[in-house]
Structure formats: C-alpha cells, structure tokens
Image (cartoon, rainbow, N blue to C red):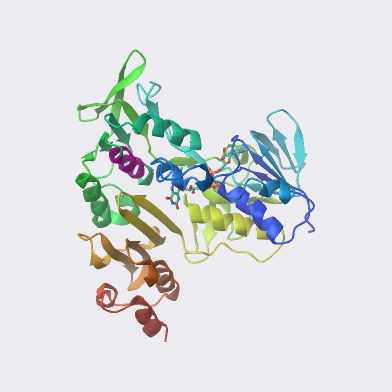
Amino acid sequence: MAVENIVIVGGGLAGATAAKTLRAEGFGGPVVLLAAESHQPYLRPPLSKEYLLGKAGDDALPVVPGDWYDANDVDLRLGVKVTELDTAARAVVLADGSRLEYASLLLATGARPRSIPLPGGGLDGVSTFRTVEDSERLHARLAGGGLNVVMIGSGWIGMELAAAASTYGNTVTLLGLEDVPLAAAVGPELGGFFRSLHGAHGVRFRLPASAAEITGASGRVTGVRTDAGELLPADHVVVAVGVVPEVALAEAAGIGLRNGILTDASLRTGTAGIFAAGDVANALHPFTGEHHRSEHWSNALNGGKVAARAMLGLDAVLDTIPYFYTDQYDVSMEYSGFPSLVAGPPVIRGSLAEKEFMAFWQREGRVVAGMNVNWPRAAKPQKAIKALISARTAVSPDRLADAAAPLDQLLDQLLD
Ligand code: FAD
C-alpha cells in the first residue's frame, strides 16, 4: 500500500528515530510527531549519569539537532497528548478533541516509572525518575551533599542514582527485593561486583528489604521504615522500582497486548496500519523465537529504524542483539545478549578485583550473553561478544577465560 501520511505518537528516542529514518529512506509525505512532553525528543541515559553529575549539559540530550524537524518538514508538536485511537477511522484523537488521520501509525509511547502504594509516598522529597525535569530537580537537591538519601529499588536506575548521590557526598542507603542488586539482570556474581563497587563508595544496602512506610513531618519526608521495622533517616527518597509500558491507548483500542504491545519482528501490531517500537513494544525476536520487551536505548534506536522502514513497506526486521550500558563511578559496562537464555554462572576473562574484565554466559556451550567492564575499546569487546552470540557455536569456557588469547583470534578459529 502506498503510504500517504504517517503519525507517530511519542516523542522519545524511538519516535524521533523513526521520523529521522522515514526521511533518510526518502519518504516525502507528511510526518507528524506528537509528543506529550514539552521538550524536543531527548536521550534519557545521560539523565541518571553525566547530566545528573553536571558533567554534560543540555547539548548532550537531543536525539537530533533542534532545527532538524523544520529542516526536514517533520511536524513536531510538543506538549500534545493523544487521548484516543480510532482504529476504524484510522485517526488519533488529541487532548483538545481534534482528530488527525493516518495511513500508518507508530506507537512509541515508551514507559513510565512504576509506582508502589506506600504510606507517605506523596510527601515532599519523594520522587521517581524518568524525565529531564526529574534529573534537574534531583541535581538541585543532591549536588550540595550532606543529605541522607534512600533509594528504593536496586535495578539499573536505582544503582546509577545511588552512584551519583554518593559521588555528591550524600549518605546513601539502597533497598532492594533481591539478595544481590541487579541479580535479575546479570546474576548474583556480577550483581555482587556492583554491590562491592558501591560499598567501596560508602553506599549501604538493605537486601532483601522493602519499604513499608515513608515517614514525614510537616509534609516533608523524614525517613523510610523497612519491612524489618528499621527506620532509615531520609532527607530525600527516590522510588526506582522499574517501569510499566504506556499501553493505555493501545489497550482502549483493542490492540493485542502482553507485557506491552505485541508485535511481529517487523514491529507490526495485529491492527492494520499500526506499529509499535521502543520500551512499549513486546516484539518477536528471530534469534529466540520469543517475544522480548526491552527497556534499553539501543532497542528504541533500532526499533525506531525498523518500524519506519516497515511502515514504508521495506523489508525490515528487528533482529539486533539486545545491548545496553551503564556508567557508575569509574566503571563503564556494556552488555549484549539474551538474559532469558542464560544457563549458569558466567565465565570471566580478566579481573573483577581490578575492575577490568569480560563475562560470558553460555547455554549448551554457546555464548548467549556477554559483558565488558572497562575493557580496552581497541579490542572491540562488544563486536566480539555479538559475533560469538551470532555464531551459535560451542566454545570452551577455558578459551573464553584465556585473556592471553585475543578475542578476534578466537573468533577466527571458531568461524573457520
Ligand atoms: P520514551 O523515552 O519513554 O519516550 C516516549 C515518549 O512518549 C515520552 O516522551 C512520553 O511522554 C510520550 N508519550 C506517551 N504517551 C503519549 C501520548 N498518549 N501522546 C503523546 N506522547 C506520549 N538504556 C540503556 O541502554 N542504557 C542506559 O544507560 C540507560 N539509562 C537510562 C536512564 C534513565 C534515567 C532512563 C529513564 C532510561 C534509561 N535507559 C537506558 C533506557 C532508555 O532511555 C529507554 O529505553 C528509551 O528512552 C526508550 O525510548 P522510547 O522512545 O521507547 O520511550
């Protein structure tokens, strides 16, 4: 079908990348990008890292330069929320009641922080974290140091915020439901590495523990009571307990859902003309034959590209190996692979104690995921990890662990 006009709902990385790709592919028809936030589409990863730490400014955030939208005739409408999808009429309804028809529609509505019903959750000084405003407010609060800060949640965002808060000289206590932070993401061995890293910077952990109540006085937070009854003093509390995909529009329109919006590998939903990409999409991945919903930067980037091409009727499949990264203190980590395929503990190449290593996870002898921490970039560790995963070839743990055998040599031998 010839596409006449394309509407994109959600001005995050996935939505803006889709707009950029449409133009890069030569699509000359109307493109409208509807963005509930008042900022031009921006990158979120710096918000909990260099932006929060004051090491990067506003210029680090835009997905594309500010003048790109006008220059490329993309109708970016900021502060505009879509309230309804009329799939029968192929139209979206905006908050002011106006309607906008589409030939193809991309849902790139992302995710929002999960909220937990905690007594005291509405007190001043209790926040969640997702937007540039959240980052600016937290920066203003933490940068002077000297506060008691409690992080509720021991996932990536909680850990990155704990790192920033302690770097600013605050006293940080982190609560999490797991025995080891990040265990669900990288297993107990590597979760333990991150725990030690934080411990060395004075972060205190309460694990496993949940918050039973947030205490306050005169409307302001004063502490967090754990389920074990301990009262942790707090001047500021961040609730970072994961995100939920923004599926309200899709749900009301009867689009198929399961842990997000279900799509095929080309990011098509089951409803004609509607695609989904980024944090909100639970896409079929050709490597595993299963659906994966990824909450990472590279998935929004690659998903935006694939959805744009698929909307134009081009061959496009989201088959990239999931990738993400984190920076905490002096540790830069990158990870590629499929956590759901991991069977058993990782093989380590290098030294955890020296904070320079790679980790490989295997299943039936094949590498299914890998991580590098402070590994020399010249060795292209991520390229090697992705090649090992794609090769689907068994490799002995000894060879993976042998730091004397360069990875490119290992790959050459394996792929011969
Ligand atoms: P979003 O960025 O959530 O954008 C969706 C947009 O749609 C939002 O602006 C929302 O307001 C808008 N919207 C929703 N509903 C509507 C509607 N009805 N009408 C109009 N607009 C609507 N990933 C990594 O790989 N590495 C990292 O280090 C990393 N760090 C992160 C740090 C933070 C603090 C956060 C929050 C995320 C981080 N991520 C990281 C994850 C990564 O940023 C996300 O995966 C990515 O932002 C998802 O992009 P998206 O476009 O799908 O969704």
Is residue 389 visible in this depiction of the protein?
yes
Residue placed at 29% from the left, 27% from the top?
Answer: 212
Asked if one can make out residue 117 in the rendered structure from this viewpoint, the answer is no
Which quadrant is home to the N terminus?
bottom right
Q: Quadrant of residue 375?
A: bottom left
Which one is nearer the viewer's eye here, 100 or 371?
371
In percent of width and height, residue 208 lies at: 24, 40
Q: Quadrant of residue 176?
A: top left
The number of numbered discs placed on residues in the rendered structure image is: 0
As rendered, which of 174 and 258 lies closer to the eye? 174
> Residue drawn at (30%, 53%), measured in percent from left and top?
330
**Above or below, comparing residue 201 to residue 321 in the picture:** above
Examine the rendered structure and indicate whether residue 223 appears above or below residue 293: above
Q: Residue at x 71, y 28 (%)?
A: 96
Give the x, y percent position of residue 218: 34, 12
Q: Main secondary structure of the magenta part?
A: helix
Q: Is residue 258 magenta?
A: no
Residue 160 part of the magenta segment? yes
Name the residue at the bottom extreme.
416
**Residue drawn at (32%, 78%) of the image:** 406
Highlighted magenta segment, given as a residue range: 158-167
